[in-house]
Amino acid sequence: MPIFNFKGVDESKVNEYFKQVGELALIINADVKKFVFWHDPSTLIGNGYEKDAIQVSIEWVGRPLKQEEVSKHIQKFFGNISKNIYVKFEEINSFLYLNGECIG
């Protein structure tokens, strides 16, 4: 269950990117129905990139060989609105529970 959390980008762009979830599913070999996208309306403060930065955090069952490809997919889509795109991967493996059941 890949969970994508977007910061520093409008909700409309996250919705637009969600339309490409089929491509992401093919890249990482995951069921489209398992993807979760969150929009987090937060603002970066400091480091000079306040007006031009996006952070995408991805929590998933580890796929280290797919990280670069997913990062490039994100960069390709959001690169026209930001030149500073941070992509962070976190392996949840057996540490994610949904409604009391281990799903990660």
Image (cartoon, rainbow, N blue to C red):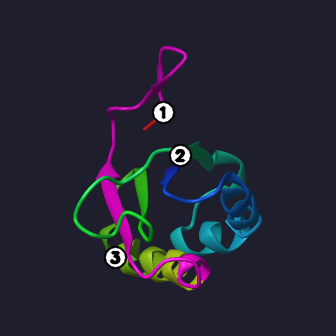
Q: Are marks 3 and 1 in contact (CB under 8 Å)?
A: no
Circle 1 residues within 10 Å: few <14, some 14–19, many ≥20: some
- Marking on residue 103: 1
Residue 61 horizontal side relative to residue 23, left or right: left
Residue 12 spot, x, y in % from top left:
74, 57
Write the residue at 56% across / 67% down.
29
Q: Which residues are magenta?
A: 77-102
Q: Nearer the viewer, residue 65 or 44?
A: 44
- 76 or 12, which is in the foreground? 12
- Residue 93 sits inside the magenta stretch: yes
* Circle nearer the N terminus (3, 2): 2
Of all residues, the one furthest to the left in this rendering is: 47
Question: Which residue is rendered at x = 40% and y = 32% of the image?
Answer: 96
Q: Which numbered disc covers residue 65?
A: 3
Image quadrant containing the C terminus: top left
For badge 3, the amino acid type reads: Leu
The mark that comes first in sequence, 3 or 1, is: 3
Q: Pinpoint residue 21: horizontal percent, then vertical percent.
A: 69, 64
